[in-house]
Image (cartoon, rainbow, N blue to C red):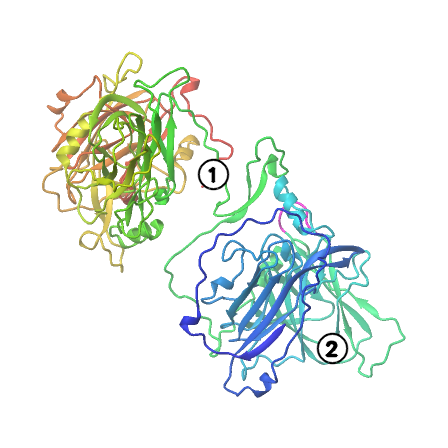
Amino acid sequence: MEVEQECTTPKNQDYQIPKPVVCPPAPRKKMERQQTKQNPPKNVRLFGVFAALLLPEFAFCMTRHYKFNIVQHNVTRLCHTKSIFSVNGRFPGPRIVAREGDQLLVKVVNHVSNNITIHWHGIRQLRSGWADGPAYVTQCPIQTNQSYTYNFTITGQRGTLFWHAHISWLRATVYGPIIIRPKRNESYPFRKPYEEVPIIFGEWWNADPEAVINQALQTGGGPNVSDAYTINGFPGPLYNCSSKDTFKLKVKAGKTYMLRLINAAMNDELFFSIANHTVTIVEADAVYIKPFQTDVVMITPGQTTNVLLNTKPYYPNATFLMAARPYFTGQGTFDNSTVAGILEYEHQLNHTSSTKKIVFKPTLPPINATTFVANFTGKFRSLNNPNLTASVPQTVDRLFYFTVGLGSSPCPKNTTCQGPNGTKFAASVNNTNQTYTYNFTVTGQRGTLFWHAHISWMRATIYGPIIIRPKRNESYPFKKPYKEVPIIFGEWWNADPEAVINQALQTGGAPNVSDAYTINGFPGPLYNCSKDTFKLKVKPGKTYMLRIINAAMNDELFFSIANHTVTIVEADAVYTKPFQTDVVLITPGQTTNVLLKTKPYYPNATFLMTARPYFTGQGTFDNSTVAGILEYEHPLNHTSYTKKMVFKPTLPPINATTFVANFTRKFRSLNNPNLTASVPQTVDRRFYFIVGLGSSPCPKNTTCQGPNGTKFAASVNNVSFALPTTALLQAHFTKKSNGVYTTDFPTNPPKQFNYTGTPPNNTVVSNATRLVVLPFNTSVELVLQDTSILGAESHPLHLHGFNFFVVGQGFGNYNPNKDTANFNLVDPVERNTFGVPAGGWVAIRFLADNPGVWFMHCHFDVHTSWGLRMAWIVMDGPLPNQKLPPPPSDLPKC
């Protein structure tokens, strides 16, 4: 149904964004093979009451109404009858005709059992994204007996596009042309053709296309190829049992025809040619181009191309085939057949020739004619005249580099797959569909750790707990708790965290701080507009183990539960000597297990558990407080009608460095006969690393927002670590480190100065990928010294691949002549992350008995992004179990 009316500009109040909806699951029933008994509404075309004739000359646009009824009906091709989906019972579907500037309202009514959406391929959808159509991207599908009206305006486009279903493989039969003519009172940039004819290429399966793709996805193999290509729905005379199903284009001599070519095929690029005729290409994807002539057109699925066909000036007593066959460069099978239609001249006197007509066939390029394709596509140029300029962006704000191609995904267990080497076929953009199986063994650890993304700032939302219980038949070194509960701190940005750090790295300034902290993903009641609160319900007289994890991006946190004391029993998956505390300090990357003994009676009260930052640096930070609720369950499940008191905990001041120093010194390894602290008593290699912030020069012709117009940087021993484009472990294992990294990382600071006193004038750091090499089983002592170059600040340093022992810590500059005498070599705490004190130092020891390349970095992600990171190479040992194994077969490639 099509209705035209004068176009009006919608008022703002008339445009309402739909409320968010939850997409219902797709129906599980298979496609009904028989038509429904109730006949859907017939395709009725209504004309406005002579509206088009009465419009004033200044009415440049119209509103056009169409109605698409999605139905099932039987179609016979290749002597095979089957039920197909279509629009209004037509295959291909009805054409949409409009002019540039027209508004389209297309009501789609679904009368079949499958869900449906329609995509208006190539329409720019300016401020009408709700009408674009990809299922589960811009809309939930239209379900059975439901409808949806697509509302969009054609802006800045003229030529040919097409519409098609955009869910699963329904577009195999659900498609049709969109014909966009110039605005009224405007003309083509070429002579107006005598007639315009859509030529739509498609693919035909004798089987149900939905069953074809479903089987392929289930088995992991390639789908069965189509049985034929079609032109305007017809396979043509070159297929068996198909001579009657042939599209015929009847033309007159000496005329110009515009053929609107559309490739609606599912999976194949096509070569197309008309025997003994040349065409002139004038438009591509609804944009005029500089005309050029060709005997063969190459057109990919989704593309449209308008060509002008000048017929012969006389009546030829001949029939001319117009044929298409695939251009194919991939692996595997494909439909290597040819579809043909017939170009037939009408006799000027309508005479019927008694002589047999000669049949001419076109010559098409070889299947894999890549050189022809490259030369052909290189001829396309925008028209770019004064009336139709090519607005090519002359400057670029962001550059992207996407790799696209096929790959594989693992075959599910107990399943046989038909993809490459027993896997399942997959495809990806920048390997987004790639998989990798992490395979590791938990050795010598028990307690709590966590996993998180480790690229850019994606770990802002990608993280979770790792709970390691004792070996079977072993118990905790304390009474087994009644219940165990993970408490995970995080940070929440209303903006995209990736955009936050990318902007900071681009401008050289500090990133915008988070909008909230979270407990188990919830900001809690102390923030505006936040009903999202974590509640811990407990019973009186019980012991709960809280597995506390700081997954926040950039902040150390104080944590406390009102009117309750906790007992610390584990840190970074290593048991500690128990000690009680009202407040827990935890840095990003650290984990701490605490025992919470609930009150022996039911208190008619609510207790807040809150966390807020410990901060010693310069600049802004998220000075807010996250809260959860500790709530007691009534022993008799009674509901109290008296108002409960709410108790809030008292947290230390933001910059309570003395409290932090005293708190961290209380941690001691358990070090009992069953769990000894294997502290290295002798040292093979000593290192002295200074860590802190600095600056890097601002690029030329750029304004930077870092210190004194520079860019913020961070470094270890004045080296701001540059990430390579090849994985360090891969380069090390393959012995191809040349151009990837060097092994000359400085053992001591390159320049000595008063590290915690007056900073030097030059704060510029170097950028390099420099590593330290350690022989297997080297005992290492590393002193990490904070600096005051851009202000003293604590730095939670995390070492991959090892636990280390914190043998000493202090304030000021480390003095090896006197500070080593105070080292604890008996029961120091064993951790993987520890905060370098603001304006102080920490000394750690570890045994390099794990071959590989191991990252060490600040767990403030902003500092890591600025370069406060480095890596250690631990060489293989002499024994087989002391060597790095080869990489897994599915290891992603850089």
Provide residue 671's location: percent of width, then percent of height.
Answer: 26, 16
The label on residue 312 is 2
Provide residue 665's location: percent of width, then percent of height.
Answer: 18, 26
Q: Is residue 512 visible?
A: yes
Provide residue 500's location: percent of width, then percent of height.
Answer: 31, 51
Which residue carries the number 1 mark? 892
Q: Nearer the viewer, residue 537 or 299?
A: 537
Q: Nearer the viewer, residue 756 or 555?
A: 555
Horizontal side, residue 452 vs residue 713: left or right = right
Which quadrant of the view contains residue 378?
bottom right
Magenta stretch bounds: 329-335
**Residue drawn where x is 30% and y is 25% of the image:** 543
Horizontal side, residue 275 vs residue 115: left or right = right
In the depicted structure, whether residue 166 falls above or below residue 841: below
**Residue drawn where x is 67% and y is 80% of the image:** 194
Report the amino acid beneath label 2.
Answer: Lys
Q: Is residue 771 visible?
A: no
Report the amino acid beneath label 1.
Answer: Pro
Q: Provide the secondary structure element on which disc 2 rests.
A: loop
| Discs 2/1, front | 1
The label on residue 616 is none
Q: Residues within 10 Å of mark 2 (few under 14, many from 20)?
A: some
Provide residue 102's location: percent of width, then percent of height.
Answer: 53, 75
